[in-house]
Amino acid sequence: MAPKHQAPRGTRDLLPEDTARWQWAEARAREVFSRYGYSEIRTPIFEDYELFARSSGESSDVVQKEMYRFSDLGDRALALRPENTAGVVRAYLESGMGGRSRIHKLWYMGPMFRYGRPQKGRYRQFHQIGAELIGSAAPGADVEMIALFVDLYRAWGIDGLTVAVNSVGTPATRLAYGDLLRAWLAPVATQLSADSQARLVTNPLRVLDTKSEVDLALFQQLPAPPRMVDHLDADSADHWAAVCAGLDAVGVAYEVDHGLVRGLDYYTRTAFEVHDRTLGAQSALGGGGRYDGLIEQLGGPPTPGVGFSIGQDRSMLVLQERGLSVENPTVVLVVAMDATRTAAQTLARELRQEFAVESDLEGRSFNAQMKAAGKSGARFLVILGEDEWQRGQVAIKDSKLGTQDVVAPSALAALLRSRITA
Ligand code: HAM
């Protein structure tokens, strides 16, 4: 019988076999953030619609096609957050963090919402792990941010990612570059896909991001496109050179991708993305960049910022495909006989103050418990035999060492501790 209710289109449940992996990855990420000196920030899952409309850009896909907009019962115009940089900046301004110290290093993880067409690696509720460094315009901040991104993946056991970087300049140089792009595309403008023709008017840089086969074939007929990095203002050009030199110096592999433009409008200067091409269409594992105008645009004093978000759903797919399996956390299994069942529950509860312990809840026979123990993956079996228990002893089997010992229950915790840490 089909269940009466299904998860809404584009959402999914993370079941225990998933959450074990997700928690493992999140724990590693927390460690890396803390080593880099970042602190967690948690902002609401919904915000004023205007906050996202202003920051992402009115012509962006996120605002035009993907926003979960709603009015609440008080008729407030709200939206589920499609991304979290705007929320973090709002919180930064609202709490007056900028007045307390100049530089703030923040991280977050949590669900985001975009009304896109669901497919593998693309969901309507998805999850991001992100970082924002607010208050520094130095190229070193961009370099640290990219190194942090790469090191999060390293902590997950994935090396050798290549980061694609570009400079998108300032709003003024982007405007001028847009005109160059229009001129470059003029010979094929009327043959471009409808989406690209619309973008050519509103935001010509986004045409470079087209997925349309027709558009890509048309680009092939044209000479090489103008490159944004050749049309930067002097300060942005210096910044770009310093970021590339900094990445070289700290040993982060990167490729310059002259066609890299981001889907959100707030970027200035450095923009970057990391892809895993084995993932097909939804290959971007994450991206970010500098947003030096955003804080001022949202009503604050001119304050630079740089950050990224990793798409956690896609990253977890990559980890799964590369065979990440998280060990069964059960370490100790307590096996009882009829006369020792209550004692076994008490002992299990005591051991649980320190260790991951399972015990039989259903009054199963000794043989059934031993059979289940074999499958459980637990390293230690603590067996409460009737005669031994009478004598004040329990047996402990260690499957790793292949040993069996008989000890007093009061000596168990110390023995387990010493074996586990040995
Ligand atoms: P974004 O490039 O829009 O940037 O999203 C970052 C990542 O989130 C993407 O590379 C992708 O892995 C994942 N993602 C986006 N949409 C979906 C979806 N529908 N399903 C699954 N995964 C998705 C940002 O969001 C910026 N806030 C990054 C940033 C932080 N820039 C500066 N600071």
Image (cartoon, rainbow, N blue to C red):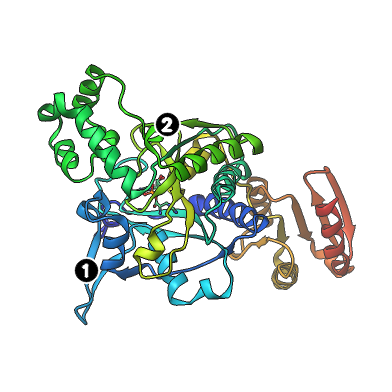
Q: Position of residue 212 (x, y in %)?
A: 22, 30
Callout 2–callout 1 Cβ contact below 8 Å: no
Is residue 1 visible in the rendered structure shown here?
no
Q: What residue would you read off at disc 1?
A: 70
Q: Position of residue 25 (x, y in %)?
A: 57, 50
Mark 2 or 1, nearer chain start: 1
Residue 258 lies in quadrant: top left
Q: Secondary structure at mark 2?
A: loop
Task: Choose between 102 and 252: the one closer to the eye.
Answer: 102
Disc number placed over residue 9 in the picture, else none:
none
Task: Choose between 100 and 383: the one closer to the eye.
Answer: 100
Residue found 55% across the figure and 44% down from its top = 146
Residue 407 lies in quadrant: bottom right
Residue at the outermost left position: 190
Is disc 1 surrounded by few (<14), some (14 to 19) or many (20+) residues within 10 Å? some
Query: For the residue marked with disc 1, what is the amino acid?
Result: Phe
Residue found 23% across the figure and 27% down from its top = 184
Q: Position of residue 219 (x, y in %)?
A: 24, 23
Q: Is mark 1 within 8 Å of ligand 1?
A: no
Is residue 372 visible in the rendered structure shown here?
yes
Q: Secondary structure at mark 1?
A: strand
Q: Position of residue 28 (x, y in %)?
A: 62, 52
Task: Choose between 9 and 169: the one closer to the eye.
Answer: 169
Is residue 16 depicted above or below 157 in this figure? below
Is residue 286 depicted above or below 293 in this figure? above
Q: What residue would you read off at disc 2?
A: 257
Residue 389 shown left or right of residue 96 in the figure = right
